[in-house]
């Protein structure tokens, strides 16, 4: 991969100008990089990093989290499990719209507390229609409400992901286990991916996230739930810091009705395979050809 991004340009400048002149050359851009160290600015793309590179990066990020948030955390870099392709299914007949999944996502993934952010939106829709134009995620009444059903929406980990195609610096890509990831250290915050996503599954960090030390989830992953810097995009990643270690996503564990099903699409004995083979499933906005790995079904 040729380094044609800002990092590549910075490296070339550094090699050409020398340390002192390089620092002066970078001065005009310090306003939008004042929270980045020189090591972060010059970091190579994730796919080019050596094991020792990643060890140093994780150590730096852990130290930064302690300094900025007062929390001791462990940031890992779990890789895809061989012969695993993750998929998710959701039983719309069972979902009651309680939004405990969204709350679990908020806490598990170290979202900004001030905004109450989550990677999951739960839509309330009139029964008898699948037209999302008549849905809302802003309901405040008791649930489930008469005449309504509920549809949680999050990243669908598309095999033909438009968000990946539009990223100008390859800060987002699809991993071998089907998870679309974001490297927050590489993202330039252009928001092209946010605009391209038909599921409104990506979030932009307008401010530096606020998370009290006591509420920081210390079990973190580089491409996952570590606290994101200001000015970058983030998204659901199927809780890869959990699922790549054999655990279930936090949203699934929080669901009180068992409406969520997660597993390995390659395992013929998995629950997700049973759902796909025995239920009438559909994907959201199928006509767009995004080929999601997130499926919906009803009991009937």
Image (cartoon, rainbow, N blue to C red):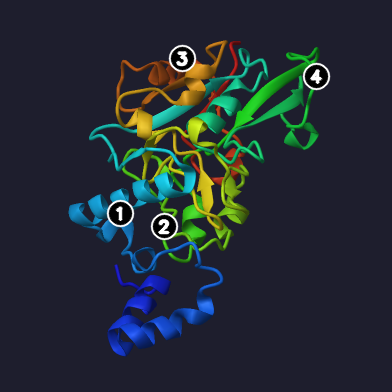
Residue 129 showing in the rendered view: no
Q: Earlier in the sequence, mark 3 or mark 4?
A: 4
Say which element carries label 2: loop
How many discs mark residues in the rendered view?
4
Residue pointed to by mark 4: 141
| Spatial separation of the CA atoms under disc 2 and disc 1 | 10 Å
The quarter of the picture where the C terminus appears is top right
Q: Which mark is residue 278?
A: 3
| Spatial separation of the CA atoms under disc 1 and disc 3 | 45 Å
| Residue depicted at x 65% and y 36% | 116
Q: Which image quadrant for residue 46?
A: bottom left
| Residue depicted at x 37% and y 38% | 73
| Spatial separation of the CA atoms under disc 1 and disc 4 | 45 Å
Quick one: label 2, few (<14), some, or many (20+) residues within 10 Å?
some
| Spatial separation of the CA atoms under disc 2 and disc 4 | 40 Å
Q: Earlier in the sequence, mark 2 or mark 1?
A: 1
Q: Earlier in the sequence, mark 1 or mark 3?
A: 1
Foreground mark, 2 or 4, reads: 2
| Residue depicted at x 23% and y 57% | 53
Say which element carries label 3: helix
Residue 58 relative to residue 203: left or right: left
Quick one: label 1, few (<14), some, or many (20+) residues within 10 Å?
some
Say which element carries label 1: helix
Residue 162 relative to residue 9: left or right: right
Foreground mark, 1 or 4, reads: 1
Q: Which mark is residue 57?
A: 1
Residue pointed to by mark 2: 185
Residue 8 showing in the rendered view: yes
């Amino acid at each position: 991969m040729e380094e044609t991004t800002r990092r590549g340009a910075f490296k070339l400048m550094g090699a050409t100008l020398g340390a002192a002149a390089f620092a002066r050359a970078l001065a005009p851009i310090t306003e939008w990089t004042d929270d980045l160290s020189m090591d972060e600015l010059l970091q190579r793309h994730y796919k080019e990093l050596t094991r020792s590179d990643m060890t140093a990066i994780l150590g730096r990020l852990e130290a930064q989290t302690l300094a900025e948030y007062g929390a001791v955390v462990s940031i890992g870099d779990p890789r895809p499990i061989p012969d695993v392709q993750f998929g998710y299914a959701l039983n719309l007949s069972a979902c009651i719209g309680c939004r405990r999944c969204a709350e679990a996502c908020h806490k598990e993934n170290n979202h900004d507390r001030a905004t109450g952010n989550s990677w999951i939106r739960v839509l309330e829709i009139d029964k008898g229609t699948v037209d999302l134009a008549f849905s809302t995620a802003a309901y405040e009444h008791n649930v489930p409400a008469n005449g309504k059903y509920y549809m949680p929406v999050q990243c669908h980990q598309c095999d033909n992901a438009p968000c990946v195609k539009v990223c100008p610096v390859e800060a987002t890509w699809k991993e071998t286990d089907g998870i679309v990831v974001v490297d927050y250290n590489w993202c330039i915050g252009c928001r092209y991916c946010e605009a391209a996503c038909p599921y409104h599954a990506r979030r932009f960090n307008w401010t530096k996230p606020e998370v009290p030390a006591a509420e920081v989830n210390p079990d973190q992953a580089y491409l996952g739930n570590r606290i994101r810097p200001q000015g970058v995009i983030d998204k659901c990643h199927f809780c890869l810091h959990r699922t790549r270690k054999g655990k279930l996503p936090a949203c699934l564990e929080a669901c009180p009705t068992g409406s969520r099903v997660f597993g390995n699409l390659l395992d013929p004995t998995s629950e997700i395979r049973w759902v796909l083979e025995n239920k009438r499933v559909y994907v959201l906005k199928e006509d767009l050809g995004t080929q999601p790995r997130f499926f919906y079904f009803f009991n009937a």
